[in-house]
Amino acid sequence: MHSEVACIMAILAMVLAGSVLAAITPEEAAQLGKNLTALGAEKAGNADGTIPEYTGGLRTPPAGFVSGSGKWPDPYVNEKPLFSITAQNMAQYKDKLTEGFKAIFSTYPSFRMDVYQTHRSFWVPKWVEENTVKYATQAKTADEGNSLKDVRCAYPFPIPKTGCEVVWNDLVMYRGIGVYEKLVEGLVDRSGRYVVSAEQEQFWEFPYWDPKTTEFEGYREYAIFNGPPRMAGELLLVHETINPLEYPRKAWQYLPGQRRVKLAPEVAFDTANLASSGILTYDETWGFNGSLERYDWKLIGKKEMYVPYNCAKSFEADSNNLQAQIIDPSFVRFELHRVWIVEGKLKEGKRHVYHLRRFYFDEDSWALLATELYDNSGKLWHVMMDLPLNNYEEGGMFVNQTYNFDLLGHAMVWRRFGKEGLIKFAKERKPTAFFQPDALAGRGVR
């Protein structure tokens, strides 16, 4: 009886301490850099050789790459698809298709997945690998998985035990110290008509990955809207933290019609994002972003699946490459990779338009590559594929081009770069004032 009471008291103590979840053991961490990569992926290929051994990634830029240009040529431009998956033959490949992709085939008969040779091209700088190994036995989640603890400048959970830990690996994924991009977001309706909903310049900064600072922020975003006319001149500033319960997201907007900067707490969770014509929610950017607090997260496991990968060619596609309601399938490269599958189910008493979220994360990079979102009646509503781009110079990966299929509304939101867009990775951080609300008004169009 005494032992039972002691056990109960120990559990209560953990709960009162904020539900801190323990890190992995030294014995588990010893696998990193041996049979596992430093970031936790299986080094070995699969049994039939369709997934190769990890040998360090693509560390040599492809021919035609010009440093600082913002353009990223396809390193595998001369490769041809091994085979294609269509609505007619998808049953042959169903074990390696996500439920979302199966639904796209059913909804859009012209959709096609061109499957290429698998390249495990992702890599990060050596110091990122070393930090990940160093913090592997220290990193924890707190507040029922909603906060990070005792880790920075590292992938916190290379050997994950919970769904929250996998999501956190993606939320803080290494993208360098900062990114500048120029992109366009648009809507393709059920008739195939394409309408631009937002033309943006975005500056991203990732204090989490700066060894010279102890800031608790995960990232900062500063967006300039150059079009269409109804949005031209708007500015958006977001500060996201790794402890969102104690330090919630802060967001500010500058609206030309009001000529002032205002706090924008609604820029979070399931508020409709007008940059996507109101079809997507704010926490759908990158597949998922923001606080984990409204969902119970479950780690389903790891599986071989066909996912978008090495998608440099996709970054050249523009509105001229649309076919009916979808992008020309020849622009999207699919490969077979091992992915972690995580489900988030809406907590009792919490509110969100999505009752269930299912995510597929690449084992090498922890990037979220495919997403399924279900409404409160259990119907599959949105299917998103995120198209990853490797940084050939500095390592890391950036994922901000997406195709989001609204299956119930028969529409697609396309976040794209196209021939006029670009992505530049920063070499150093901007002055602190650049990402502060006081400076927002000074940059606003009056």
Image (cartoon, grey):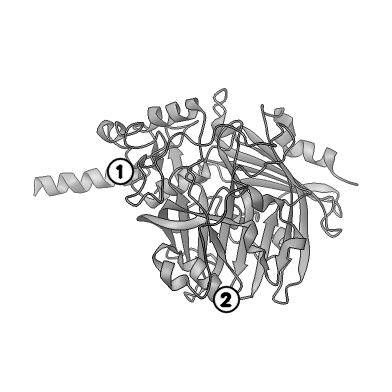
The reply, left or right, for residue 19 in relation to residue 210 is left
Residue 363: where, in percent of width, then height? 43, 46
Q: What crowding class fits label 2: few (fewer than 14 Cα within 10 Å), some (14-19), or many (20 or more)?
A: some
Report how far apart the C-alphas of labels 1 and 2 lie in the structure.
47 Å
Residue 362: where, in percent of width, then height? 46, 49
Q: Is residue 281 visible?
A: no
Q: Work out which residue is located at the far right of the displayed protein and give it.
A: 446
Residue drawn at x 46%, y 68% is 99
Q: Is residue 258 visible?
A: yes
Residue drawn at x 70%, y 54% is 416
Residue drawn at x 60%, y 35% is 392
Kind of residue at badge 2 = Thr
Residue drawn at x 74%, y 39% is 437
Residue 353: where, in percent of width, then height? 55, 67
**Of the pair 222 and 365, the residue shown nearer to us:** 365
In front: label 1 or label 2: 2
Establish if 442 lies above or below 161.
Answer: above
Which label is found at residue 14?
1
Please give the residue where the numbered disc 2 appears in the rendered image. 107
Residue 435: where, in percent of width, then height? 71, 36
Kind of residue at badge 1 = Met
Establish if 136 lies above or below 74.
Answer: above
N-terminal label among 1 and 2: 1
